[in-house]
């Protein structure tokens, strides 16, 4: 597994709209991180933010859309998938 360059990372809530990003680390409580992984929001998954507004973020993950509040999205570290 490649080492994470935290200087090049951002949170999912900071990710630009429409840009694919790769999840590197979940900083939520263990039970919340477990549930995120069950939903497919796990390390190495590629997601795109497709809508931001009113404190919520909608992400596209494979063929699914998942809604998260901005605080929870702020606990997911991502980096550009380029």
Image: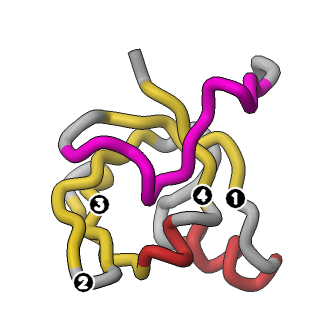
Q: Which residue is mark 2?
A: 54
Q: Which residue is mark 4?
A: 76
Task: Name which of mark 4 and mark 3 comes first in the sequence.
Answer: 3
In the image, residue 2 lies at what x, y percent? 76, 18
Nearer to us: label 2 or label 1: 2
Q: Which residues are magenta?
A: 4-17
Query: Are discs 1 and 4 less than 8 Å apart at CB?
Result: yes
Distance between the alpha carbons at the discs numbered 2 and 1: 23 Å
The secondary element bearing badge 3 is classed as: strand
Distance between the alpha carbons at the discs numbered 4 and 3: 12 Å
Estimate how packed mark 3 is, as few (under 14), some (14 to 19) or many (20 or more) residues with alpha carbons within 10 Å: many
Task: Name which of mark 1 and mark 4 comes first in the sequence.
Answer: 1
At 34% from the left edge and 81% from the top edge, which residue is drawn?
55
Nearer to us: label 2 or label 3: 2
Distance between the alpha carbons at the discs numbered 1 and 4: 5 Å
Name the image quarter holding residue 9.
top right
The question of residue 22 being in magenta is answered with no
Q: Which residue is mark 1?
A: 26
Distance between the alpha carbons at the discs numbered 4 and 2: 19 Å
């Amino acid at each position: 597994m490649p080492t994470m360059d935290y200087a090049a990372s951002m949170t999912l809530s900071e990710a630009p709209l429409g840009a694919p990003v790769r999840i590197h680390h979940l900083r939520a409580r263990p039970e919340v991180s477990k549930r995120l992984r069950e939903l497919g929001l796990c390390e190495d998954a590629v997601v795109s933010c497709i809508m931001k507004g009113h404190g919520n973020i909608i992400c596209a993950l494979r063929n699914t859309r998942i809604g998260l509040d901005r605080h929870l999205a702020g606990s997911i570290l991502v980096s550009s998938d380029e």
